[in-house]
Amino acid sequence: MTYVIAEPCIDVLDVSCVSVCPVDCIHYEEGVDRKLFIDPNECIDCGACEPECPVNAIFPEESLPAEWVQYTQVDATWFTDREAARATVDELKPSG
């Protein structure tokens, strides 16, 4: 089980969740990414990040709203293919 960062994070990028993560599993590339990403292989399911998110974008995987289930894969993909993850984010929520 892991936590997932969904659509409300896009173009917000509030990093308060990063500072409370005890295992540093939340990542992004500043100036490039439009959202933060949780590494499913590093997340220890502690939940520390969830209450810190000002836009309620972080969910336990099993509680992710149906309209955002694809963000589970987007987060995982970022750690193996950043460009593919970024392209999917742009498809799911075009900028502008």
Image (spheres, grey):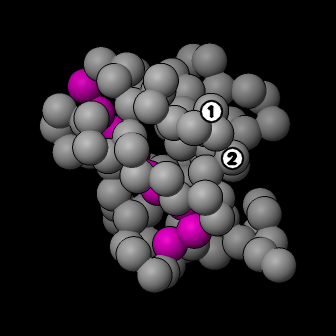
| Mark 2: secondary structure | helix
Q: Position of residue 63 (x, y in %)?
A: 62, 18
Label 2 with label 1: CB-CB less than 8 Å: yes
Side (left or right) of 57 relative to 30: right
Question: Looking at the rendering, in which quadrant would you find the C terminus?
Answer: bottom right
- Of helix, strand and loop, which one carries label 1? loop
User: In which quarter of the view is residue 80 placed?
Assistant: bottom left
Name which quarter of the figure residue 35 lies in: bottom right
Outermost residue, left direction?
Answer: 23
Q: Residue at x 72, y 39 (%)?
A: 68
Give the crowd class for mark 2: few <14, some 14-19, many >=20 residues within 10 Å.
some
Q: Residue at x 55, y 54 (%)?
A: 74
Type of amino acid under label 2: Pro
Q: Amino acid at mark 1?
A: Asn
Q: Residue at x 65, y 26 (%)?
A: 64
Name the chief secondary structure element in magenta: loop
Query: Residue 8's mark?
Result: 2
At which x and y percent is residue 2? 40, 28
Which x, y percent locates residue 37? 44, 52
- Left or right: 12 in relation to 94: left
Q: Earlier in the sequence, mark 2 or mark 1?
A: 2
Q: Residues within 10 Å of mark 1 (few under 14, many from 20)?
A: some
Asked whether, in this view, residue 87 is left or right of residue 81, the answer is right
Residue 56 against residue 91 in the figure, above or below: above
The answer to which image quadrant residue 12 occupies is bottom right
The residue identified by callout 1 is: 56
The span picked out in magenta is: 33-45
Along the line of sight, which residue is nearer the eye, 86 or 55?
A: 55
Query: Which quadrant is the N terminus positioned in?
Result: top left
- Asked if residue 40 is among those painted magenta in the image, a careful observer would answer yes
